[in-house]
Amino acid sequence: MKLLDCPLIGRRPISEFDYVGEVRKPPVDCDTATWAAFVFNRQGAPSVLRERWYHRPTGYWFILDRDTLTDEVKAIVDAREVRYDIPA
């Protein structure tokens, strides 16, 4: 069984979590083509991504910096602290 650490209550089954998506800076004042590219195109190469997650039992939103190649969690970030920068 795959487990993920909830920042509030510790290691839990992945089935308790919802993956909400990658944190990306949305374009401002853009044309339709630019907005469509933002919505539908994603980086496909393995890398460290900043992702939004939601833990259903606690109702807690948080951000993970996760290596998509190894599935290793590099850092847990409070959602209130997120900026639209790329994780280092």
Image (tube, rainbow, N blue to C red):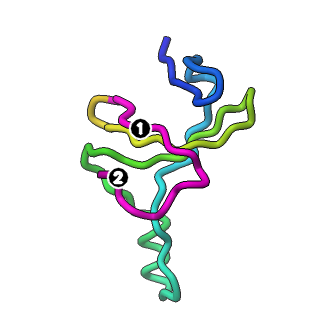
Q: How many marks?
A: 2
Q: Is residue 3 magenta?
A: no
Q: Is residue 78 magenta?
A: yes
Q: Quadrant of residue 71?
A: top left
- Residue 55 in the image, given as x and y percentages of width and height: 66, 32
- Residue 78 in the image, given as x and y percentages of width and height: 57, 45
- Residue 15 in the image, given as x and y percentages of width and height: 61, 23
Question: Magenta residues?
Answer: 71-88
Q: Is residue 50 above or below residue 37?
A: above
Q: Which mark is residue 75?
A: 1
- Is disc 1 placed on a helix, strand or loop? strand
Q: Which mark is residue 36?
A: none
- Residue 47 in the image, given as x and y percentages of width and height: 27, 45
Q: Residue at x 32, y 56 (%)?
A: 43
Q: Residue at x 54, y 46 (%)?
A: 52
Q: Are marks 1 and 2 in contact (CB under 8 Å)?
A: yes
Q: Is residue 65 left or right of residue 17?
A: left
The numbered mark, 1 or 2, whose residue comes first in the sequence reads: 1
Extreme-top residue of the structure:
1
Q: Residue at x 55, y 17 (%)?
A: 11
What residue type is disc 1 on?
Ala
- Is 88 in front, or is 4? 88
**Which residue is disc 2 drawn over?**
87
Q: Is residue 66 above or below residue 41?
A: above
What residue type is disc 2 on?
Pro
> How many neighbours does mark 1 have within 10 angstroms: few (below 14), some (14-19), or many (20 or more)?
few
Q: Residue at x 52, y 88 (%)?
A: 29
- Is disc 2 placed on a helix, strand or loop? loop
Gap between marks 1 and 2, in whole Å?
A: 9 Å
